[in-house]
Image (cartoon, helix red, strand yellow):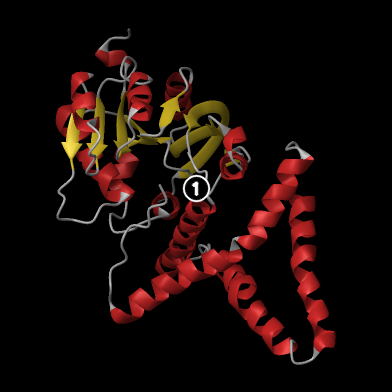
Amino acid sequence: MQGDSERPFGVVAIGRNEGMRLKNCLASVIHQARQVVYVDSGSTDGSVNLARDMGVAVVELDLSIPFTAARARNEGVARLRELVPDIRYIQFVDGDCEVVSSWLDQAVNFLAKHSDAAVVCGRRRERFPERSVYNTLCDIEWDTPTGQTKACGGDAMMRADAFAAVQGYRASLIAGEEPELCVRLRAAHWKIWRIDGEMVLHDANMTRFSQWWKRTLRAGHAYAEGASLHGSSAERHWIKEVRSNWWWGLSFPVILLAASLQPVLLILILLYPLQMWRIYQKSNLHRTPYERKLFAIFCVLAKLPLMLGQLKFNLNAMIGKSSRLIEYK
């Protein structure tokens, strides 16, 4: 084991009722990090005692304040910096993930060599992609290009000083908190990198269409809120995505409904399979044909729940109501 001076990073793990997945998560980092902090969002499965028994510092979130991953991570960082004020890097990890043994050193070395990098992330893989089409879709979603990128996911290593300079995550966001943080980091002239390294194994554990639907609804909410916060900035954060969701999820279906009065115009419905074909052609070529077809079909199917998620955000904003966490498992 390295000495404390040779371990310039701590770990903030968040979770709720993750059971054995949390145990695997903490075990994957506890002997490498200078300090591990686990933030619990109201678990009832013994997660808090499990973490404490493993020697991990635990933060139990105040139950009277709505839970968000952003809030949990912020409180985890606050506790980490209380325990280790001079910590240089922070590895964030979700409690349903296990960190690959080689990742932490790789991430530290990258940040040490790239002084303008605030965030580095690597490859997140699904542990059981074959168990359901929804797990497979998650594995495809994680398979993104390397190099400078606009956003990281919930698992990433961040420079502590950069995180503090932009005041961390926006705690009120129920989703999309990492891309929103990255917008502010880039505005402060930091860079976000995704490198070619195995980072974590993730267990989505999605086996039902209803879970996929809720997760996608949440993503639509995130698009709308992100665009409302930073859509007028130079990079037009998520404006393109929001407009696409409105078109395919609302405007075009309304046009089809109107066209039903003139049956000959129903040929317009062929635009949906044509869009699937276009996505298939542009999708990741190293995925299998089956995976590319699955991805294309669900990208188009997703437009409805994405639009509904956007609608939910806009309606809540109109009446001044705060959005509550949309849980899918």
Q: Residue at x 43, y 33 (%)?
A: 115
The answer to whether residue 87 is visible is yes
Q: Residues within 10 Å of mark 1 (few under 14, many from 20)?
A: many
Residue 64 in the image: above or below residue 18: below
Q: How far across and how far down the image is residue 28, in percent?
A: 38, 20
Which corner quadrant of the image does residue 76 belong to?
top left
Q: Residue at x 41, y 71 (%)?
A: 312
Question: In front: 58, or 260?
Answer: 260
Q: Residue at x 78, y 64 (%)?
A: 273
Q: Is residue 273 left or right of residue 91?
A: right
Residue 245 in the image: above or below residue 190: below
The answer to whether residue 284 is visible is no
Residue 128 in the image: above or below residue 239: above
Q: How far across and how far down the image is residue 186, in percent?
A: 45, 51
Where, quadrant-wise, is the N terminus in this rendering? top left
Regarding mark 1 in the picture, which secondary structure is present there? loop
Question: In front: 189, or 180?
Answer: 180
Q: How far across and how far down the image is residue 86, in percent?
A: 22, 28
Which residue position holds label 1?
151
